[in-house]
Image: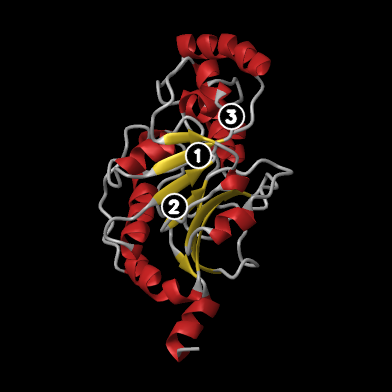
Amino acid sequence: MPFNLEDLQKAMAPLSQFRALAVSPHHERFSFPFFSGTYFTYRKIDVMRVVAIAQSVSRDPSYLDVGCGYGDFLKRVREFLPKATGLEKDASIYYGLGIEKPDYISISDAHWIDKRYDVIFVGWMEPGQDFRDSVARNTDVIITTLDQGISLAAEFDGHSFERIAWWRTPSWEDVNIEIMNKYYSSIPAKQREALSKMRGAHNFWYVYCRPEKSGQVRKAIESLQEKDEQYDFESVLDELGFARMQKLENPAAPEPLWQIQFDQQDLKRLQTGL
């Protein structure tokens, strides 16, 4: 996560003001994700999908979260994969937030990944940076999150990987817009309702594999029996019209949210054995 210490310090005052007036203690993770959440929106089912993919590759999988920030998502994954580790480029993030860096997070540039992992998760890639070669050299399975609104260049199709599955979720900005419109603005109800119908979902989760791993990973995804378990903050998503399997009215987001889509080319290859 890129940040400037001076900007961070300036943002503390608005955060304090927001907390004093917040309708819900969960709103800040979407409105101030650097402090309280992630730059991608997730549910528990996202965590469980990532865990299932990792466990399909190995009984005791090695897992690296690249660009993990202070580790909000990684912490959830570690509840099921206790050996999971993270990589963050800038140690100052911990100083700026006033927290201690966990031992399982290393400070290093992703260009210098020097060991192999069963799964590498890419949750952030700064615009202008490209460490895909380093990631691709050191794993056979990659999971990414990609915000349509930011040029993260996080696709791995051209690195001898195949995208086998994906799903759509709202970005933190999509959620924040709805939070502000519904709870912290004076927009008339009719106008607010009209704006809500235009809400989007701009975050994509992509699962990439080398061809020899595609079958077992796809099978693991297909056999998932997803339970209706949620983190507390997921209630915000439900209240704002971002429920699981919700179909938005916005034609730019035609797929139901969190519905797993399988790459048809990969399916055809597996069926024909080519």
How far is mark 3 from mark 2, CA to CA? Answer: 37 Å
Q: Secondary structure at mark 2?
A: loop
Residue at left 25%, top 52%?
227
In the image, is residue 243 above or below residue 173?
Answer: below
Q: Position of residue 108 (x, y in %)?
A: 56, 37
Q: Report helix, strand or loop for mark 3.
A: loop
Residue 58: percent from the left, percent from the top?
Answer: 31, 62
Query: Residue 8 vs residue 45: left or right?
Result: right
Q: Are marks 3 and 2 in contact (CB under 8 Å)?
A: no
Marker disc for residue 246: 2
Q: Is residue 145 visible?
A: yes
Category of crowding for the residue at label 2, using alpha-carbon neighbours closer than 10 angstroms: few (below 14), some (14–19), many (at least 20): some
**Marks 1,2: beta carbons within 8 A:** no
Foreground residue, 82 or 154?
Answer: 82
Residue type at mark 3 is: Asp
- Please tell me which of labels 1 and 2 falls first in the chain: 1
Q: Which residue shows up at 58% across the image and 34% down it?
A: 89
Which residue is tagged 1? Answer: 87
In front: mark 3 or mark 2? 3
Q: Quadrant of the N terminus?
A: top right
Three-letter amino acid code of the residue under disc 2: Gln
Labels in figure, total: 3
Q: Amino acid at mark 1?
A: Leu
Left-right relation of 201 to 49? right
Q: Nearer the viewer, mark 1 or mark 2?
A: 1
The residue beneath circle 3 is 90
Identity of the residue furthest to the right in this view: 128
